[in-house]
Image: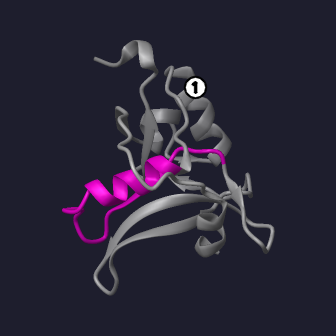
Amino acid sequence: STDDMFKVLKLPKTGKMFFESVLLSTEDLTGKELSTFQEVLEGARRLGLQKCTPRVALELRLQYLDQPVNEYIQIGMDPMVSSEGEHLIFSLGCSEDYGLEILGLPVESNHRELEGDELWVFLLPQHKRK
């Protein structure tokens, strides 16, 4: 569950995090309309992008307060394992029922097909940052 994911995080109580991220679709990353999570990660690596830490998801959720309803953005990160053994990544969403939220998206199955228009956040490498 998402609650299990938060228990893993050790966040400082003060300080700001600065990062430059890019938003790309699954199809941008893989060149395909349907892809697996591993193919998305490989596509990001080929483009020279870096995976996010879980902290990036939390910072983005705090900063992206005008997210449109029904938009969901996957965080390109190493999966975390829940207490049930599921491999999850963070997804930032905005639903009509709950508003702004952080969800746990299961990604352990290489058979799960990710749609080409799903949005992903990855980090620019430090040498490409302004």
Q: Which residues are magenta?
A: 55-78
Which of the 4 quarters of the picture holds residue 16?
top left
* Residue 83 x/y as whole percent: 77, 72
Q: Is residue 17 above or below residue 12?
A: above
Residue shown at 59% from the left, 71% from the top: 2
Q: Residue furthest bottom?
A: 97
> Dividing the image into 4 quarters, which one contains the N terminus?
bottom right
> Dividing the image into 4 quarters, which one contains the C terminus?
top left
Q: Is residue 126 above or below residue 123?
A: above
* Residue placed under numbered mark 1 in the picture: 45
- Helix, strand or loop for disc 1: helix
Q: Residue furthest left?
A: 66
Q: Is residue 14 visible?
A: yes
Query: Left or right: 92 with respect to 94?
Result: right
* Residue 122 x/y as whole percent: 46, 37
Residue type (three-letter) at the residue carrying disc 1: Arg
